[in-house]
Amino acid sequence: MTKKKSNILKITIATIVLCLTALLGTYLYAKHTITQHLQYNLPPHIKVSYNSININILLGNITLNNIVFKELTKDSSKIKTLLKAQKIAVKNIGYTNLLIHKKLSANKLTIYNPKLTHNTQLNTVEKSNKTKKHGILAKPITIAEFKTTNGTVNFMTNKIDTTAAAKRIFISLKGVTINTNSTSNKLPITYKNSSISAQKLRANLGQFEELLVDELDVKNESFTVKNLLLNTKYTKKELSQKIKTERDYVKLKVPSIHINNCNYSFAGNKVLIGIANFTIHKPNLEVYRDKLIADDFSYKPMYSKMLRDLPFNLAITRLIINQGKIAYQEKLEQNITPEKLTFTNLNATISNLQNHKNIKTVVHTNSLLMGKTPLELNWSFNTLKKTDFFKAWGNFKNLDIPSINPFLNTNLRVKAEGDMQRMYFTVSGNKQTALGDLKINYNNFKFKVLKKDRLGVNKLLTKLGNLLIKKDSKQNPTNFRYGEIEVERNTTKSFFNYLWININNGLLDALTGKGTKKK
């Protein structure tokens, strides 16, 4: 071997050794820096531990195995937030950004099998938005792709009661930017594309109700919910034993919900949630009320006020309900099983369901009363009108009286006979009073008042009642009898009770009054 070749070999070996030494030094420095930062540079109430750390300097990859994150309470005696993960992997850290621009970036960050538990009632150290971050955290952190696999979430209270939970959570966000120095109320994270899925979601809605969802899928601005169930936690009998004032037993089943073009933005201190289309497919609502329980005399706000008082701004351009069903029962007597009042094949469209613009919200519905009688109900209101002004109008055609008699029997102790071909009503009102009119076309209408045991007819009351009711509307030139509506609202009752009282007021006036149209 010549002297020249020997020198080249020595230089090559020295270079390789130097590179390996540099890589080893860089690896040890990176490992030490990360370890020191996780152990000593975090706030006192934040604790992080892990079993091992793997670093690939050439590829810019870092993996933490079996990592545990803890957020402690003010006195460090309890854990408020606990996050465990099988591993956290960061791939292809951008050295150029880090060394030249002092910015942290990576191609991919993946959290494997995270399990998050969070106590919603424990207090932690107050966070200040005015505290400025320094070093690489002072600039936005960019991640080309963020993922979590097979995660679980559990929010609970001090009593170990679960307030919300979800399983098999998979998240994929692309084009992620994290602004650690954000001082506004806006979210510190932005992203371009998203894909989120979760199963077995559960939310505790209070002492009596809960919400369950089998599956949730999110693709950018579109949401799909499968098999939603909102129901009372107890049976009807158990609920009656637990409440002191009347409360509805509720069971709402929805096979699927589709939400398109959902987005959010910020206007001052309020978030605005905007949705172009919100579609609810085949909802089935069962409501039961035990009227033997004492009345609830608390104030019942109008829907416009409820929307107005939301802590966020809402703008749903169009909400559609397809092929729904509602069944309502009232228990009025101890030993009488109440019949259901049903509305089937319910279809509805709500336009401009919102609470921040001076425009009308308009509701159009149609259904089949007791599965037989076509029924149409519409109403409109403006959420910004603090008088809660509304207008409602509707009609039915060819009332199938035999279909509603079971309900009339158990709830009103009456039985109706005859024909009711058409009825139309219009009501305008506010949160206190309402006025309107009604017209009805009917023939040979009469009713029988039943005895308390419902096994016979109370002939005296039946005769007196039918003396007051006009037999038909044929005597009027238009073949309709007219009724005037004038009602004062009972503010301890719901809007639908208010609406029913209006219709009932006009119906009684049409059946027993002059029956002529007011000029």
Image (cartoon, grey):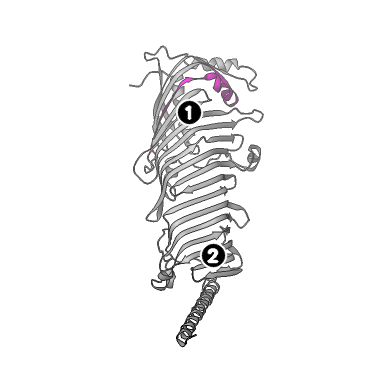
The answer to whether residue 73 is seen in the rendering is: no
Residue 202 magenta-highlighted: no
**Residue extending furthest toward the bottom:** 3
**Residue 460 horizontal side relative to residue 268, left or right:** right
Q: Secondary structure at mark 2?
A: loop
Q: Is residue 370 above or below residue 262?
A: above
- Mark 1 burial class by Cα count in 10 Å: few <14, some 14-19, many 20+: many
Mark 2: which amino acid?
Thr
Does residue 222 appear anywhere in the picture? yes
Range of magenta residues = 387-416
Give percent across and percent down for residue 448: 56, 17
Q: Tell me which residue sits at (55%, 63%) in the image.
A: 88
Q: Residue at x 52, y 46 (%)?
A: 216
Residue drawn at (63%, 40%), measured in percent from left and top? 239
In this figure, which residue is indicated by the disc labeled 2? 124
Q: Is residue 238 above or below residue 340?
A: below
Please name the residue that numbered disc 1 is placed on. 367
Mark found first going from the N terminus, 1 or 2: 2
Distance CA(mark 1)–CA(mark 2): 52 Å
Which one is in front, 279 or 382?
279
Q: Total of numbered circles in the picture? A: 2
Q: Is residue 337 above or below residue 233?
A: above
Q: Secondary structure at mark 1?
A: strand
> What amino acid is labelled 1 in the image?
Ser
Q: Is residue 518 positioned above or below 364 on the image? A: above
Label placed on residue 460: none
Q: What is the quadrant of the C terminus in the image?
A: top left
Labelled pair 1, 2 in contact (Cβ < 8 Å): no
Front disc: 1 or 2: 1
* Residue 479 % position (x, y): 40, 14
Image-quadrant location for residue 40: bottom right
Q: Which residue ends up furthest to the left in the rendered image?
A: 519
